[in-house]
Amino acid sequence: MVSDITLAELEQRIQKATDPDGVFAASKSYVMRQEVRTKQFLDEDNIKMVELKFEKPDKLALLTYEDNKVASIFCTDGKYGWIADCKSRKIAQLDAEGLKRMQVLSRLSTPGSGGYAAAFPKVELDKCIDADGEFYRVTCYPEHQKTPIYFYVDADDFLLRKMKMTVEVNGRSFDYENRILDYEMKEGVNIPAV
């Protein structure tokens, strides 16, 4: 379905919904923690804590915790990136493709960065309805991936509710979906609830 607003209007409404007073946009650094739940077929959900640390202009660290211990770290200083597997105590420098992925994540995580249009070379916007409700679907085409990333923004409150993408690991493709059910206001910023 054709969108009834432009991408620029959507990004302004997202900004107002998530950061009404400009607190996040004015920040030079932040730390955000979030519980990530992965549904397992015929098994208990896999629950991990994820911590995102950011410092302007482009320093980013993404830490994943298992059993309250750091299990892995993805980080970049803007020019180089690394991945650390804390269980095996191995660190590897990211290749060019991995670094580009981290740079896209860094641009999306940067307060006041300009949103989707600034992070991706090609962005399309439409509107859709599914079992979860009515959404603005932002289709983003990264330079380094064959398949797009889909962001679903609630048409009523303008908060990001889900993200879908195909991830390639060791030559195999997997569909990935992240849903954000609830938000809470913390220090003037509307963030996903843990």
Image (tube, rainbow, N blue to C red):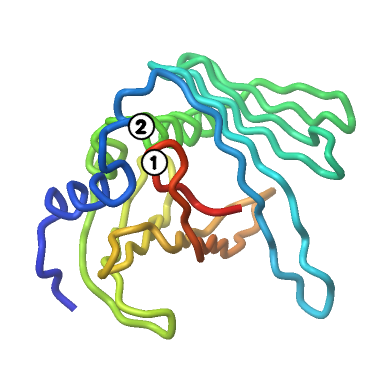
Please tell me how crowded label 2 is: few (under 14), some (14-19), or many (20+) other residues with Cα within 10 Å. many
122 left or right of 56 in image: left
Mark-to-mark CA distance, 1 and 2 = 6 Å
Amino acid carrying label 2: it is Phe
Q: Which of the two residues, 82 or 181, is positioned nearer the viewer here?
A: 181
Mark 1: few/some/many CA within 10 Å (<14, 14-19, 20+): many
Q: Quadrant of the N terminus?
A: bottom left
Rendered position, 25 above or below 177: above
Up-down relation of residue 94 to residue 119 (above or below): above
The picture places residue 88, in percent across and down from the top left corner, at 89, 30
Identify residue for label 1. Answer: 189
Q: Secondary structure at mark 2?
A: helix
Q: Nearer the viewer, residue 14 or 150?
A: 14
Residue 38 drawn at (x, y percent): 69, 63
Q: Which mark is residue 24?
A: 2
- Which residue sits at x=82%, y=44%? 66
Label 1–label 2 contact, CB within 8 A: yes
Relative to 114, is 63 on the left or the right?
right
- Quarter where residue 108 is shown: top left
Please give left or right for residue 163 compared with residue 142 in the image.
right
First in sequence: mark 1 vs mark 2: 2
Identity of the residue drawn at 28% across and 77% down: 128
Amino acid type, label 1: Val
Secondary structure category for the residue under label 1: strand
